[in-house]
Image (cartoon, rainbow, N blue to C red):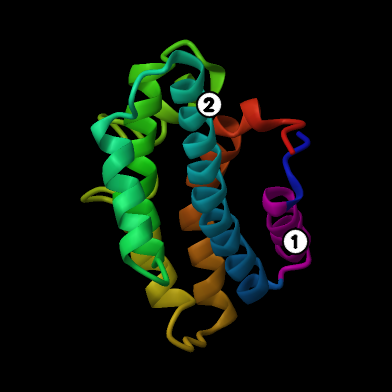
Amino acid sequence: MMLPHTLSHPYAQFQKHRKAGEWSRAANYLLDFFEAGVQYVSIVLLGMLRDEVLATGNSCGENTKKVVAKIDGKRPLSMGDWCNDILPPLVKEIAAVMPDHPLSISLSGVVGKKRNIFLGSKAEKSIVQVRNEYKGHSTTLSETIYAEVVEMLLPRAEEWIAALRPLEGYV
């Protein structure tokens, strides 16, 4: 799959280091892929919603207004901001405004009411929690632990990759 370089580069590096058994590097690149992905997709959705407003003359929805206020009101934005307060409301908004758009459909399956791969569940840690525990704040752990992190996140990475398919060729 050909994703924009912002997304394809960290994922390719993850795959390279995973294949080589370099688990700390693989885990770091996988977390970079999630972080870049949530930010990139959020910006794409904001652009799509802006284009829709300009094309229809309608005003933007409440979710978009809240997201823009969040972005305008806080610098720098944390990974938690992107995963909790920015991407989910934008996915909800795009589903309401453009329900048949391929990106709207695919994202609703991974960042929707029933499932949000970034927030986790009782059985799995959130991506933000994993990032903070295993990468953030100058954390250094054993290669065995990083291998476990990769295995823990791999199913969600595969779901995220599948959800990003509509971005193939998008620049």
Residue 41 seen by the camera: yes
Q: Is residue 15 one of those drawn in magenta?
A: yes
Asked if residue 148 lies in the magenta stretch, the reply is no
| Left or right for 128, reference 39 | left
Answer left or right for 52 relative to 167: left
Judged from the image, the secondary structure of the residue bearing numbered disc 1 is helix
Where does label 1 land, which residue?
13
**Residue 119 appearing in the image:** no
User: Which residue position is annotated with label 2?
Assistant: 51
Q: Amino acid at mark 2?
A: Asp
Residue 69 versus residue 13 in the image, above or below: above
In x, y percent, where is residue 10? 69, 59
Quarter of the image with the C terminus in it? top right
Taking the spot 50% from the left edge, 65% from the top edge, the residue there is 148
Closer to us: 169 or 124: 169
Where, quadrant-wise, is the N terminus in this rendering?
A: top right
Q: Which element type, helix, strand or loop, lies under badge 2?
A: helix
Select label 1 or label 2 by which is in front.
2
Q: Amino acid at mark 1?
A: Gln
Q: Is residue 6 left or right of residue 51?
A: right
Which residue is most to the top? 100
The answer to which image quadrant residue 17 occupies is bottom right
Real-space Cα separation, disc 1 to disc 2, in angstroms: 33 Å
Extent of the magenta region: 6-21
